[in-house]
Amino acid sequence: MPFSIGMSELMLIMVLALLLFGPNKLPEFARGIARAINNFKRAAEDVKQELNLDDFDKPRKSPFEEK
């Protein structure tokens, strides 16, 4: 994987986030990100249901095949 993050890089990112946002704003920021991800998942599921993408998984018969 070209973008794998090790433990040291993850710790550095966490320390930088703590310094930038502070201990009071960091939980708020994390909740906002979680809400955005959940809204995106719901919207994607709604689009999938509206387009009936489940029907595309089923094999279709050719109109030229005999019955």
Image (tube, rainbow, N blue to C red):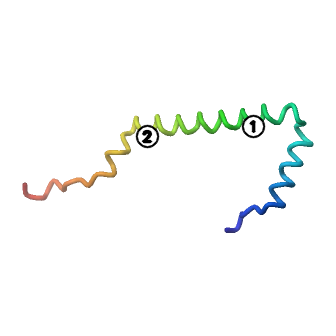
Question: Which residue sits at x=84%, y=49%?
Answer: 14
**Neighbourhood count class around disc 2 (C-alpha, 10 Å): few under 14, some 14–19, many 20 upward:** few
Which of the two labelled residues, at mark 2 and mark 1, occupies the earlier sequence position?
A: 1
At which x and y percent is residue 56?
33, 49
**Neighbourhood count class around disc 1 (C-alpha, 10 Å): few under 14, some 14–19, many 20 upward:** few
Viewer-proximal residue among 47 and 13: 13
Viewer-proximal residue among 22 and 55: 22
Q: Secondary structure at mark 2?
A: helix
The dot on residue 30 is: 1
Residue indicated by mark 2: 48
Q: Judge from the rendering whether residue 67 lies leftward or rightward of residue 28; answer left or right.
A: left
At which x and y percent is residue 25?
84, 32
Question: Which residue sits at x=67%, y=37%?
Answer: 34
Question: Which residue sits at x=33%, y=52%?
Answer: 57
In this view, which residue lies farthest toward the left?
67
Which of the 4 image quarters holds residue 59?
A: bottom left
At which x and y percent is residue 3?
71, 63
The total number of labels drawn is: 2
Q: Give the spatial CA distance, label 2 vs label 1.
A: 27 Å
At which x and y percent is residue 8?
84, 61
Q: Amino acid at mark 2?
A: Lys
Q: Secondary structure at mark 1?
A: helix
Q: Judge from the rendering whether residue 36 lies leftward or rightward of residue 60; answer left or right.
A: right
Q: Amino acid at mark 1?
A: Ala
